Image (cartoon, rainbow, N blue to C red):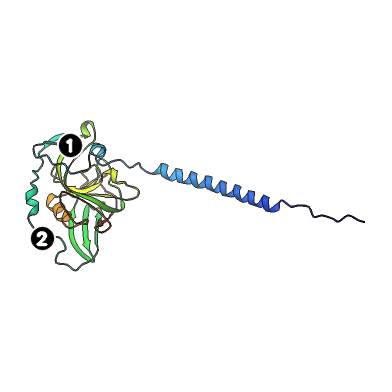
């Protein structure tokens, strides 16, 4: 009796599967290389206030301190917390309700605050001179009535007590620990030109008005954004022409 022919087992499916794994592995390696190259080309995020970021990003008030900026002694304003109980007009109070949004134009060194379609503030600012202010979309994560900002070294060293009306912001690329903020500045009056180490300087009167307008709605010396009290979004764009 003739033997029945048996079909030989084929390895084609297994070979195809292995080939697919090899292709996916190669693609993964290319993706990692591309990601590495992109990240290598990015400027590292440096804290706007290099010493403060390590030691302190909280309320710090010292009415007996003397500051240092650009090699000169500066006298900080005294922070009288009792004065904060005085009710003042809030930006946008007489405008139609709407979402709040802050825009910072680095090219023209200006800040615009909108509530809905209503422009409630337009003012000059001073962005980063010694270190660039990051651009992109950010969110305020905490507001402080005042704090000390310290950074730099040698001739670039600065130590500024009682920096008023501080609004720290962040995003996925610029972490909270980087210490970038909108805040009042008493150590110069050259608004409209880059003058900071990365933060956005404002006249104290303007910073106070913005501080009392933004979210999270102020509640004491320190106010953190929450799900029910989220931070105001900030869009920073452009590039300082003087740098």
Look at 74% across and 52% down and name the residue there: 10
Residue at the top extreme? Answer: 154
The residue most toward the right is 1
In screen coordinates, is 96 left or right of 38? Answer: left
Q: Quadrant of residue 229?
A: bottom left
> Where, quadrant-wise, is the N terminus in this rendering?
bottom right
> Can residue 183 be seen in this snapshot?
yes
Counting from the top left corner in percent of width and height, residue 227 is at 28, 57
Task: Give the x, y percent position of residue 241.
Answer: 27, 48
View extreme (front): residue? 1
Per the image, label 1 sits on a secondary structure element best described as: strand
Looking at the rendered structure, the secondary structure element under dot 2 is loop
Q: x%, y% of residue 7?
A: 79, 55
Q: How packed is label 2: few (under 14 Cα within 10 Å), some, or many (20 or more)?
A: few
At x 45%, y 43%, the residue is: 36
Spatial CA span between label 1 and label 2:
32 Å
In the rendered view, does 168 fall on the left or right side of 172? left
- The disc label shown at residue 143, or none: none
Looking at the image, which residue is at 91% across and 56% down?
Answer: 2
Residue 159 shows which numbered tag? 1
Query: Against 226, is 62 above or below?
Result: above
Whether residue 201 is visible, yes or no, is no
Q: Earlier in the sequence, mark 1 or mark 2?
A: 2
Residue 89 is labelled as 2
Q: Position of residue 32 (x, y in %)?
A: 49, 45
Front residue (pair 94, 231): 231
């Amino acid at each position: 009796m003739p033997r029945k022919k048996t079909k030989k087992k084929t390895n084609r499916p297994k070979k195809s599967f292995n080939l697919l794994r090899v292709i996916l592995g190669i693609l993964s390696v290319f993706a990692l290389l591309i990601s590495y190259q992109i990240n290598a080309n990015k400027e590292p995020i440096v804290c706007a206030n290099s010493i403060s970021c390590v030691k302190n990003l909280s309320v710090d008030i010292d009415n007996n301190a003397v500051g240092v900026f650009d090699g000169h002694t500066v006298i900080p304003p005294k922070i009288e917390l009792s004065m904060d109980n005085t009710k003042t007009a809030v930006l946008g109070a007489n405008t139609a309700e709407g979402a709040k949004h802050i825009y910072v134009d680095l090219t023209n060194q200006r800040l615009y605050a909108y509530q809905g379609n209503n422009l409630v503030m337009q003012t000059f600012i001073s962005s980063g001179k010694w270190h660039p202010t990051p651009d992109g979309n950010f969110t305020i994560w905490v507001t402080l009535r005042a704090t000390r900002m310290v950074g730099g070294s040698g001739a670039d060293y600065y130590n500024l007590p009682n920096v008023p009306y501080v609004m720290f912001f962040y995003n996925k690329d610029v972490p909270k620990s980087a210490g970038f903020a909108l805040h009042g500045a008493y150590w110069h009056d050259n608004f409209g030109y880059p003058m900071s180490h990365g933060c956005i300087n404002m006249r104290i009167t303007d910073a106070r008005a913005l501080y009392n307008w933004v979210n999270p709605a102020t509640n004491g010396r320190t106010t953190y954004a929450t799900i029910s009290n989220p931070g105001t979004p900030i869009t920073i764009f452009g590039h300082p022409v003087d740098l």
